[in-house]
Amino acid sequence: MRYSLGATQAPHASYRNGGSAVTARQYFLRQTARVPYGQRIAPAIAGLGPNEMRPVWLDSAGEIFSVRSPENNNGYNTLDWTPFAAWDEGTRQVISGGLRIMRKLKVYSDLTGDWREEAFPAAIGRLTGPGHWYSGTVSDGAGNVYVHLAGVHRYTPATGAWFALPSHVTTNGGSGSSLVWVPSLFSGAGGLIKYGGDARRWLIYNPVTNTWPSYTDRRPCGQHSILAYHPTHDPVLMVGGTGTETVAALVTPGTGAFTLVAAAPASIAMDTSDWMVPHPDGCWLLRSGAAVDRDGLIGDSLDDIESRQLLANESLSGREWVFSMMLPFADAEPVALRLVRGRRQPGQGKPPLVIHLHTRNRDLGEIWLQTRISEQTDVDMVMWAEREDVAQRAQAMATNLEQELDSAGLNMTRLQIIHGQGPQAPMTYAPPDTGSLVDVQT
């Protein structure tokens, strides 16, 4: 693993540096590259059958997909708000730009099966301000990848060369812009479309003359909309965006003229789970995480509540109960929750309430938490974190948690933080012969 030492100077105390001038300058170590683990493709496809899917790359070490704030060392996932990546046929690589506090360029090799971080030239740099990436990585099919940073840059993967495109009329909200390459522009030479901003501006770039010869404003979709070109059609399909989440239109690339089409059946925008790709049958495939996945998770949760109530009465007559559920979230991974209270033994007080929690978080990795509450106010907690840096950060914040609990009238009797995997099955229970169901409809 290779590391680089960097420093940042905040100009004044703010919420981003802890509200204190003392923390305005902080040094930090951040992983910036990883050593590839060699060939992965061959073993992944050996004996692979029809319709079979196998993982090629599961390792998240080296923080390829995340960055760390230079001011508080918080981790941020650069895959958020990045619905598009670029495929370079010559080097057989998938290239994805990202921005979340820091700029980052992630590259996947289809020859080795490895991800790595690629360096930006010094003129671009990595340090920037708060914000998301919002797409902006597209290939021209001829060995070049266009990357939307503060402006637009052209990157050649085969040589590692970077070229800054000339400035264009501002889109007033460039971070919400989308890029799409249109091979039919300029008599088949191809050209780049950049769309976004409060002006809803359709900008056209000619790579032969290295100019932005024309633009037009007030197209139908707001910033953060998603654009896709289909090789069997000339118009570009534009869908969604901020304030126009279901609006859809076909746009003529060379002029920006548009025709509204039927509204999308669900909300579409540049968030963590929406994307659009052309399909060989002549249509476009769209995915909306706002509707299908969320409804599915809620339905699964209700089914889970119904079925697991049989365990909730291990039994009521024995005064022991277990309650398990899956809590879905629209903007985060689901959380598995289990509440357990044992039988009260003769001559003893009420047994403690034990809460088991498990989740896989994009920024924090996999986390387990076991909380035991006894005597109504005594709290005993054990946390497991797969990532060492997360365990260290949790340990550093232990005092703050104790103070928060104290302000709520609770007493922290123990807090143990463990770097490693948590219990896969914290407690085992056998289903009762008879049980009760909770009516989840009322």
Image (tube, rainbow, N blue to C red):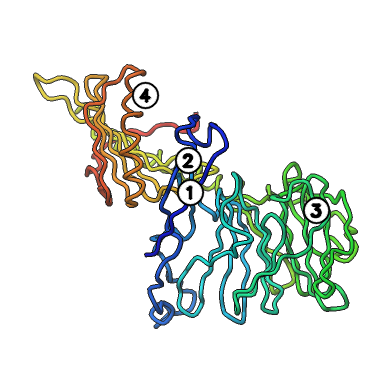
The mark lying in front, picked from 3 and 2, is 2
Q: Mark 1 to mark 4: distance in Å?
A: 32 Å
Tags 3 and 1 in contact by the CB under 8 Å rule?
Answer: no
Q: Which residue is mark 3?
A: 262
Q: State the mark number for residue 7.
A: 1
Q: Is residue 349 left or right of residue 237?
A: left
Residue sitting nearer the eye, 128 or 271 = 128
Give the percent coordinates (x, y) of residue 97: 60, 61
Residue type at mark 2: give it. Arg
Circle 3 SS class: loop
Q: Where is mark 2, residue-wise?
A: 25
* Disc 2 from disc 4: Cα separation: 27 Å
- Give 232 or 9, whichever is nearer the viewer: 9
Residue type at the position of mark 1: Ala
Element on which disc 2 rests: strand
Determine whether label 1 and label 2 are within 8 Å by CB. Answer: yes
Q: Secondary structure at mark 4?
A: helix
Mark 2 or mark 1, which is nearer the start of the sequence? 1
Say few, some or many: other residues with alpha carbon within 10 Å of mark 3 (under 14 / 14 to 19 / 20 or more). Answer: few
Q: Are marks 2 and 4 in contact (CB under 8 Å)?
A: no
Dot label at residue 404: 4
Identify whether 217 is placed above or below 181. Answer: above
Split into 4 quadrants, where in the image is the N terminus?
A: bottom left
Specify few, some or many for label 1: CA neighbours under 10 Å numbering under 14, 14-19, or 20 or more.
few
Cβ atoms under marks 3 and 4 closer than 8 Å:
no
Which is in the foreground here, disc 1 or disc 4?
1
